[in-house]
Image (cartoon, helix red, strand yellow):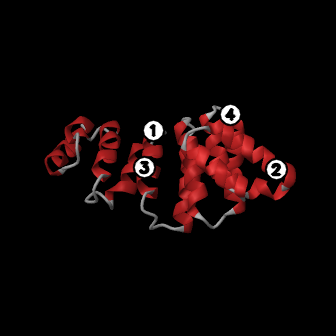
Amino acid sequence: DARFKIASVYYFRHQYDSVLAYYREELKVNIEAANKAPHMIASAFENLKNLDSAQVYFGRAVTLFPQSRVPYENLGGFFERYKRYDEAIDSLERIRAVDPQFSTVDIRLARALTFAGRPLEALRVLETRRAEPGVQHWMAHAYVLAGRRAEIERLAPAHDQPFRLAVI
């Protein structure tokens, strides 16, 4: 555990090589360490551009904690960052199956659907939340892609988030 606490300090200092070095040292004495902090390890690999290893550890987190929404969100975010939208959508839809009220899942799912070229599906996800702060920002891109720019332009005056006009 001490090595993981030290690794956490290095992680928050963005010293990812050191995170993995401490992790490898822990594995030499404790094979169960592979099940500890898989998200931190995956993020360290991702930041070092070792995407194959990052995906393995994001996946390990899902396997270890199948009823938790967080590993699916992390895995979905990973896929989205690397434009693997169908995989991101699958991961984010699993969150909705576990916890449909999870605060960020609808916005993240809609964003992945929009980037996957499925703006009408994205709008169906977001329409029920259109009055919530920040949601209109993500609706704008989907509206434009769906050929409904005029609708989002009508929402702009009521949208009080910073840079509201930049989203249209």
**Residue 115: image location, x then y, percent:** 45, 38
Residue 110, which numbered label? 3
Q: Amino acid at mark 4?
A: Asn
**Residue 149: image location, x then y, percent:** 24, 39
Residue nearer the viewer, 3 or 79: 3
Q: Amino acid at mark 2?
A: Leu
Earlier residue among tags 2 and 4: 2
Q: Is residue 114 left or right of residue 91?
A: left
Is residue 108 visible to us here?
A: yes
Earlier residue among tags 1 and 3: 3
Q: Give the alpha-carbon distance from disc 3 to disc 4, as whole Å.
A: 27 Å
Name the residue that disc number 2 marks.
27
The 10 Å Cα crowd at callout 4, few under 14, some 14 to 19, many 20 or more, is few
Residue sitting farthest toward the left: 157
Q: Is residue 123 left or right of residue 148?
A: right
Residue sitting farthest toward the top: 49
Secondary structure at badge 3 equals helix
Residue nearer the viewer, 132 or 142: 132
Earlier residue among tags 3 and 2: 2
Asked if labels 3 and 1 touch by Cβ distance under 8 angstroms, the answer is no
Name the residue that disc number 4 marks.
50
